[in-house]
Image (cartoon, coloured by chain):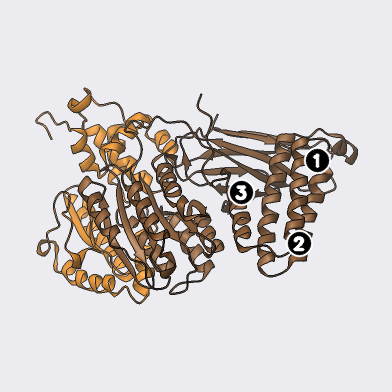
Amino acid sequence: MTLSIRQDRELVRATYRSHRFVLATVTAPTVEPVGARPSVNLAFVIDRSGSMAGAKLPLAKDAVDQGLRRLDPDDRFAVVAYDDSVDAVVQSTSASPEAVANARRALSAIEPRGSTNLGEGWLTGCRQVALSQRADGVDRCLLLSDGLANVGMTDRDELAGHAAELRRRGVTTTTFGIGDDFDERLMQLIAEHGGGNFYYIEDARQIPDCITSEVGEALDIVARGVVIEVSGPPHLEIDALGVMPLDRRSDRTLIQLPDLVSGQELSLVVRLTFPYGQDGDSIAAAFSVSDRTAVLDPSVATLSWRYADAAANDAQPRDRIVDRAVAAAFGARVRREAVELQRRGDYEGAERAIRGVARRVRAYAGNDPELRAQVKELGAAQVAFAAPMAVHELKIQHAQTSYLLRSKDAMGRSRRQPPQ
Amino acid sequence: MSPDGTYTIGELADLADVTPRTVRYYVAQGLLSSPAGAGPGARYDEDHLRRLRLIRRLQSEHLPLAEIRRRLEGMTPDEIEALVTSEPAPAPDSALDYLDALLVHRSGHQASAVLSRQAWPSLMRGIESSPPPSGRPAEPPQVIERSQWDRIQLDPDVELHVRRPLSRIQNKRVERLVELARQILEEDAK
């Protein structure tokens, strides 16, 4: 079974607009990498602005070099370097041994200088990918930066909009933010709208690990264009607690998931808001998953809920596994909001927002040890956010919430099924 | 093609504009039947090519493979042929069109804009004046590095080659040209 779903509760209130939650987990098949992987078409986009001087730029160049060694001649790559000007250092080419050797020489010539035209650097990388785009491959731009976009196109929403449009047209973007000075909101928005991954690189020494891990994931992608479809009767509102883009149609809601790697498990929480109803009536919703190359099982699973009075609602059992996922998702969302409030200097607002979520989780935590641990963690966050926090700490908090909301591990990598 | 009308995986892939890896992938996914023979001696036939072209066509219309598989099941070779040659649905602009429109608009990317202007007259003069590179193109010299040739099939025997990038307006004109050409070629066939 590719898609598994579970509901937190089965009863809903007849005279109240109840929220109920569904935990949906998509498991990608584990595929042996024997000649059948789709070819990848990558662009490495490197920030060579002045701030990359020192250890960062050599490590980034080295990391790209290591990534290139993992490609086959069926794959394609390009290298773009940007500061205030943008150069396609290596034009999109097949990853033949000679092309990789040439790219290595071109990489070594990249020197730090100038300011940061991140927008155009990124789009130029995407263009290199688009030049060699194939319907059956993985087309992805890898954008590295340690700074703020300060030249050219700098508006976050504009860039995020381009990321979404490019994703619709088959080119995805992964971003790497290095150190304390990059614009994590921008880098995260581009990755989220761009259908790729976001990595926070705290220490320049982690650059090679993160890039090889991303190239490895690109090579390991088994499902692209993955969409969870949820449909229910009119007036049943469907929402996803995460950062996955939603596409609402008249009769169904499509939740767009990132590409899945072999054996990946991706979970997300779907929130349903129920219309008023009659005691005893039932209401159902159907869930299915699909992907562009049909590696996922498209069968439809349904869940149903029954309208009941308040006493029955209060007495009903809860699925703790769903409760924990819901609490974790709300916890991540509020910490993300708190980071924004901190940046604006609203420490009291940050503290109040976290306190509100902690109170709600405590209300249903009961004796569940994991939920109680989450309440405790939120309590600690509440204290931390009540006073000004270091930029570095905010970066960590922001990255962690992004990883959690995208169902990634603490290093930003995809979670996979343990090998059998 | 061999005298017996079969193809190697490389020939088949070239004809359908995919990689051999894609062909193997579709076979593994059950969208194409297994070839006759195995290893380097594996042979594919006309039916494989037709199906492969139809799969590409349906994929370009953003149909998931599961749906494509459903549609292909139980179709006769004639039905597949008819679908492959029918008028395609209008595609949304590609990532490349989108980026060209965006980057040409910006200063600092005059290179692509100039190229488009150069490419356009040669395109209008006719196909014979600018033969496209055959086979795998060699790495082009510096000045035309930003361009690539797109192959548009107008009819089983006629192709149009277009150098990208083109501006949005030029793209629209090419689209019209393609539409008209296909109409004319269809008239001829009657």
> Which callout, 1 or 2, points to the residue nearer the camera?
2
Inspect the image, locate mark 2, and give the three-letter code of the amino acid beneath it: Ala
- Give whichever of discs 2 and 3 has the lower sequence position: 2
**Residue B171 on image: x %, y %:** 30, 65
Chain seen in orange: B
- Between marks 3 and 1, how big is the CA–CA gap? 21 Å
> Which callout, 2 or 3, points to the residue nearer the camera?
2
Q: In terms of depth relative to the viewer, which is nearer, A14 or B167?
A: B167
Tag 2, which chain?
A
**Residue A199 on image: x %, y %:** 51, 52
Residue labelled with disc 2? A386
Q: Label 3, secondary structure: give it.
A: helix
Residue B91 visible to an observer of this rendering: no
Residue B130 versus residue A321 in the image, above or below = below
Residue labelled with disc 1? A365
At horizontal 30% and vertical 33% (from top left) the residue drawn is B24
The furthest residue to the right: A311
Residue labelled with disc 3? A405
**Residue A278 on image: x %, y %:** 83, 41
Inspect the image, locate mark 1, and give the three-letter code of the amino acid beneath it: Ala
**Residue A89 on image: x %, y %:** 28, 62
